[in-house]
């Protein structure tokens, strides 16, 4: 009965996490829709699940905050920005997810712990490890988005160079590029153009773009563009040089990853393929030798 009760608590915590996430997503979607409406509308009313489980989530966030160093919280905030979730996800929500994951992991450790180890110790260890799952997922999403930006940057720079050499200004060329560019890089460039339209200086808008993405290739392009603007160099030539440089960096990165492939394959081959090969090749001979030895002994 105790195990069943603990399992029900774990399921309840999982439902609470899903409900909180779904409610936050719905609120974010409604907010984005309402921004295009001239007349302000009433804010959406949170659902019953959100109202019921929000205090539990806030309590979990308050419990996790003292356990998270300030540097860790700042890193989480940056990862939210790098993942493109700014305005959709907050540090408090990540802390809530960490608390729920830790609670579910603790309950799971209590249920499946080996009899040789105390259940409380196993629950604490599993809960501690589970609390890092939201961080791992957020970091994976941020790295995937940054890699996508780095991959699409050379083509965007080529198109930008062509439009600038055709006689358009940099902002007008960026507008043309963003109309034909989808994905994270297009979203970031469109956001930069909106900031410039709202009165932000172009240099400052480029620095904001650099801080939001933290992509090495894009940062190098922004620095080169700012230096060219200060020195009065031709922007089109700078764009072409940067596009070639970014492609060179990507080729070097691909070669580096290819050089690491044999080392990465070595361990799966040793621990998975080789044992099966040994069983297939040596197994029949070993059985015959054992059979002969047994008959000889008799």
Image (cartoon, grey):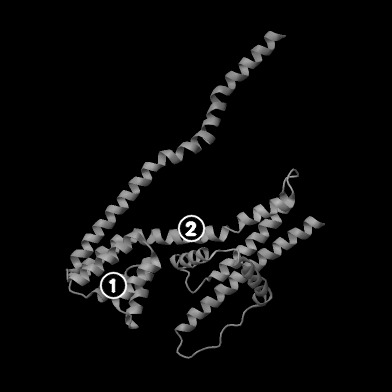
In this rendered view, identify the residue nearer to me: 54 or 158.
54
Image quarter where the N terminus lies is: bottom right
- Could you say where residue 34 lies in the image, as x and y percent from the top left? 49, 83
- Could you say where residue 157 lies in the image, as x and y percent from the top left? 27, 64
For residue 261, above or below residue 54 = above
Kindly identify the residue that appears in the image at 38 percent across and 70 percent down: 187
Kindly identify the residue that appears in the image at 48 percent across and 91 percent down: 39
Kindly identify the residue that appears in the image at 18 percent across and 64 percent down: 237
Residue pushed farthest bottom?
Answer: 39
Residue pushed farthest right?
Answer: 1
Q: Quadrant of residue 241?
A: bottom left
Residue labelled with disc 1:
174
Residue 37 in sight from this viewpoint: yes
How far apart in space, not on screen, are marks 2 and 1 (Cα)?
Answer: 29 Å
Residue labelled with disc 2:
140
- Describe residue 178's horizontal placement relative to residue 117 as left or right: left
- Could you say where residue 196 lies in the image, as x and y percent from the top left? 32, 79
Badge count: 2
* Element marked by disc 2: helix
Labels 2 & 1 near each other (Cβ < 8 A): no
Tag shown at residue 197: none
Residue 183 in sight from this viewpoint: no
Kindly identify the residue that appears in the image at 67 percent across and 74 percent down: 55
- Describe residue 221's horizontal placement relative to residue 96 as left or right: left
- Describe residue 169's horizontal placement relative to residue 218 as left or right: left
In this rendered view, identify the residue nearer to me: 140 or 292.
140
- Could you say where residue 276 lies in the image, as x and y percent from the top left? 55, 31
């Amino acid at each position: 009965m105790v195990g069943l009760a603990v399992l029900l608590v774990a399921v309840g915590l999982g439902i609470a996490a899903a409900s909180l996430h779904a409610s936050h997503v719905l609120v974010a979607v409604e907010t984005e829709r309402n921004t295009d409406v001239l007349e302000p509308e009433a804010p959406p009313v949170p659902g019953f699940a959100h109202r019921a489980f929000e205090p539990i989530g806030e309590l979990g966030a308050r419990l996790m905050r003292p356990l998270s160093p300030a540097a860790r919280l700042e890193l989480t905030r940056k990862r939210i920005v790098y993942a493109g979730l700014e305005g959709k996800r907050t540090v408090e929500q990540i802390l809530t997810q960490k608390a729920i994951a830790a609670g579910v992991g603790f309950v799971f450790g209590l249920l499946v712990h080996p009899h040789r180890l105390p259940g409380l110790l196993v629950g604490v260890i599993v809960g501690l490890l589970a609390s890092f799952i939201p961080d791992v997922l957020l970091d994976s999403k941020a790295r995937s988005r940054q890699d996508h930006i780095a991959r699409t940057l050379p083509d965007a720079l080529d198109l930008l160079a062509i439009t600038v050499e055709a006689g358009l200004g940099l902002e007008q060329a960026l507008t043309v590029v963003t109309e034909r560019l989808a994905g994270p890089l297009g979203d970031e460039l469109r956001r930069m153009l909106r900031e410039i339209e709202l009165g932000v200086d172009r240099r400052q808008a480029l620095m904001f773009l650099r801080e939001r993405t933290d992509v090495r290739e894009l940062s190098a392009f922004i620095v080169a563009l700012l230096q060219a603007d200060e020195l009065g160099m031709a922007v089109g030539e700078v764009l072409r040089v940067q596009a070639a440089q970014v492609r060179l960096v990507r080729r070097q990165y691909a070669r580096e990853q290819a050089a690491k492939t044999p080392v990465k394959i070595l361990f799966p081959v040793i621990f998975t393929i080789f044992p099966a090969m040994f069983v297939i090749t040596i197994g029949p001979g070993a059985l015959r030798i054992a059979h002969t030895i047994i008959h000889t002994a008799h």
